[in-house]
């Protein structure tokens, strides 16, 4: 997918205002007709796809997303559900003029590999519509109250994304992972990586740490690095440690 972003929940961190404005300009120029939103505030046990109540035009896309996920051996449910307040505020800030149709994705308590497969399914379903689309992950990085351990976790995470090293996200020291208390065990990030490509680059547009939470604005570039010898068919998240998952 061409337009995949991570943003924090809520109306906006002042330290991230310029980064969010950059995302808003990009999306404004693209004018997506439909936006898939993966929010860590909604964490069902199994993958679930939902349309907003009253947004019946989304039903076909919900069904297509579920079909694409089941084709990847994922158990997926569907329902009608409204956007949680944190994600709604983030979307309102990104789309101040025209609010697009929204399909919601619950960040399920699943392994990194399965979250990435769900991201692949979402991207495939969005492409199949032939409509301009975008994928937005709404969530945080570390959620520990300790600024020292949290910042250490966040910096390592963002460095791995910048270096296109998705397989490093859960292979850090377990103590760092536990102390960092990653939001939703990073399910939202693995989903975004699955949608944009496991070897995509996560470009950090802005980072902030407030009230014990690490927050970042990240743009995912799905294009392969120049000279990369890995064939596209092998671009998958592999050898990820399943740390701290139910």
Image: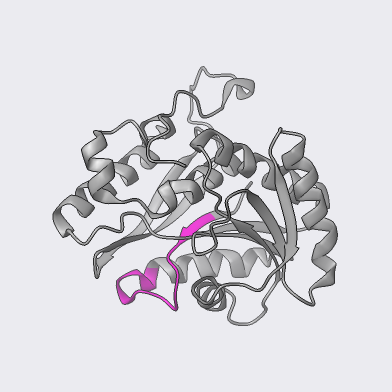
The correct choice, above or below, for 44 with respect to 14 in the image is above
Numbered marks: total: 0
| Residue at the bottom extreme of this rendering | 97
x and y, in percent, of residue 130 in the image: 82, 52
The correct choice, above or below, for 246 with respect to 172 in the image is below
- Residue at (79, 73) in percent of width and height: 55
Quadrant assignment, res 78 = bottom right
The correct choice, above or below, for 226 with respect to 186 in the image is above
Residue 50 shown in magenta: no
* Region of the chain picked out in magenta, as a range: 5-18
Q: Is residue 205 visible?
A: yes
x and y, in percent, of residue 211 in the image: 24, 70
Q: Is residue 155 visible?
A: no
Horizontal relation, residue 57 to residue 8: left or right: right
- Residue at (81, 49) in percent of width and height: 64
Horizontal relation, residue 218 to residue 223: left or right: left
x and y, in percent, of residue 169 in the image: 37, 37
Quadrant assignment, res 59 = bottom right
Horizontal relation, residue 101 to residue 148: left or right: right
x and y, in percent, of residue 240 in the image: 43, 29
| Coloring basis for residues | one colour
Nearer the observer, 189 or 74: 74
The correct choice, above or below, for 114 with respect to 42 in the image is above
- Residue at (54, 73) in percent of width and height: 94
């Amino acid at each position: 997918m061409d337009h995949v972003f991570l943003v924090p929940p809520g109306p906006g961190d002042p330290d991230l205002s310029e980064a969010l404005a950059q995302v808003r300009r990009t999306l404004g120029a693209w004018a997506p007709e439909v936006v898939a939103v993966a929010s860590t505030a909604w964490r069902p046990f199994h993958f679930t796809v939902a349309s907003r109540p009253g947004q019946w035009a989304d039903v076909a896309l919900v069904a297509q997303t579920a079909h694409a996920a089941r084709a990847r051996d994922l158990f997926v449910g569907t329902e009608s559900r409204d956007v949680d307040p944190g994600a709604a505020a983030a979307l309102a800030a990104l789309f101040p003029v025209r609010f697009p149709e929204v399909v919601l994705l619950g960040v399920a308590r699943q392994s990194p590999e399965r979250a990435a497969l769900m991201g692949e399914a979402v991207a495939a379903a969005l492409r199949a519509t032939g409509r301009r689309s975008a994928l937005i992950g709404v969530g945080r990085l570390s959620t520990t109250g300790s600024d020292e351990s949290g910042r250490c976790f966040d910096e390592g995470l963002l460095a791995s994304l910048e270096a296109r090293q998705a397989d490093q996200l859960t292979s850090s020291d377990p103590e760092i992972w536990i102390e960092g208390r990653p939001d939703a065990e990073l399910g939202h990030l693995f989903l975004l990586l699955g949608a944009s490509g496991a070897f995509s680059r996560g470009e950090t547009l802005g980072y902030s740490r407030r009230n014990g939470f690490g927050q970042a604005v990240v743009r995912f570039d799905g294009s392969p690095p120049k000279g990369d010898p890995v064939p596209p068919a092998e671009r998958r998240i592999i050898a990820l440690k399943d740390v701290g998952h139910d």
